[in-house]
Structures are given as C-alpha cells and as structure tokens.
Image: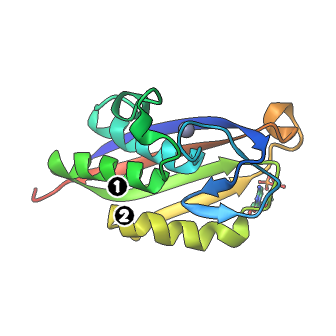
Amino acid sequence: MKIGFGYDIHKLVKSKPLYLGGVRIPSNKGLLAHSDGDVLLHSICDSLLGAVGLGDIGMHFPNSDRKYKNISSLILLEKTYNLLKKQGYKIENIDSMIVAQEPKISPYIDKMKTNISKILKSQNISIKATTNEGVGDIGKGKAICAYTVCLIQRKNV
Ligand code: CDP
Ligand code: ZN
C-alpha cells in the first residue's frame, strides 16, 4: 500500500463558472485556471500521482499546453487513474477537504462523490468542506483550496 497527499488552490474571479468535483455549483464567482479550475479534482490527482511517485499534475498536464485549455478536470482525473492502473494499483480510499468561505458545498457533495467514484472505481470516497472562518484570502472569498490524502493498493498481491 502507498499513501499520497495533494493540495491545490485557485483564485475566485467573476464571470467564471464554479466547478468542484466535476459539479457545476451556482455562484457569482468561479475558479481562475487554464483548465476548469477544479481544485478538488486537482488535489485528488496530485495525491494519486504522489502515491506512485509520478510527479505532479503540472508535469503531466502542463498549463502551457493548449489541449488542456478549459478541459474538464474529470478527464484529467481519468487520465491520472489510467496511469495508476498501468502501474498495477487500485484505489483503497480518498479523503478530501475543500476550504471555501462560500458558497455552501454540502448540498453538492453526494454528486461529487458519484462523479469521482465512477472514475476511480472505488466507493470509499470522502469529501468534506469547511470555511476558513473569515481568515486570510480564502476567508475573504478570494480563493478556494483543497487537500487530499489517498491510500492505494497494488492489485493481485
Ligand atoms: O469549523 P467547521 O468546519 O466545523 O465550521 P464551518 O467552517 O463553519 O463549517 C460548518 C459546516 O458547513 C461544515 O462542516 C461543512 O459541512 C459545511 N460547509 C459547507 O457545506 N460549505 C462550505 N463552503 C463550508 C462549510
Ligand atoms: Zn488546479
């Protein structure tokens, strides 16, 4: 078994849609990024890449590459999962924390889990949310960040 850790943050800006866990969440601001800015999925990808020692998301999907412009991060998650599968690993569990002052995330968590479970072929997906209690840039609603730890297991051992 191997554990992995991932972190990501993106700025919130007006006139961008907000995507978290592949779910479009009603909000007057969205995350600024080359892709759809889905910090949750990016932190999950980074944790999985970290667990197998395959670098990070920016190395595999460079933001200088036009083919990743506005791409759904669900596709990046799927590509990451395929890398893991090729290395002979399956996902034991994922545990994530989204830090967002607003909007309220909890109504969308089940749908996020369904999206992620389908791609990672695992039912053990945990997603949680917290505000930053008004502290710092995240607390002022200028950004959203996410942390993830994962456990993966080599198949057929
Ligand atoms: O410190 P604690 O996380 O308990 O309190 P909080 O930051 O005020 O968040 C209270 C609850 O609201 C959390 O446990 C989440 O379930 C939920 N929450 C949410 O749905 N969306 C957010 N952006 C922040 C918190
Ligand atoms: Zn990102």
Residue named by callout 2:
119
> Relative to 46, does residue 74 appear above or below in the rendering?
below
Q: Residues within 10 Å of mark 2 (few under 14, many from 20)?
A: some
> Relative to 58, does residue 23 appear above or below in the rendering?
below
* Residue 124 appearing in the image: no
Q: Earlier in the sequence, mark 1 or mark 2?
A: 1
Residue 27: which quarter of the image? bottom right
Q: Quadrant of the C terminus?
A: bottom left
SS for dot 2: helix
In this image, 71 relative to 98: left or right?
left
Looking at the picture, tell me which residue is in the foreground, 63 or 87: 63
Kind of residue at disc 2: Ile
**Residue 156 image point, x, y percent:** 10, 59
* Residue 106 appearing in the image: yes
Q: Give how far apart the Cα atoms at labels 1 and 2 are.
A: 6 Å
Q: Residue at x 64, y 63 (%)?
A: 24
The answer to whether marks 1 and 2 mark residues whose Cβ atoms lie closer than 8 Å is: yes
Residue named by callout 1:
78
> Relative to 56, does residue 122 appear above or below in the rendering?
below
Q: Residue at x 42, y 44 (%)?
A: 45
SS for dot 1: helix
Q: Residues within 10 Å of mark 1 (few under 14, many from 20)?
A: some
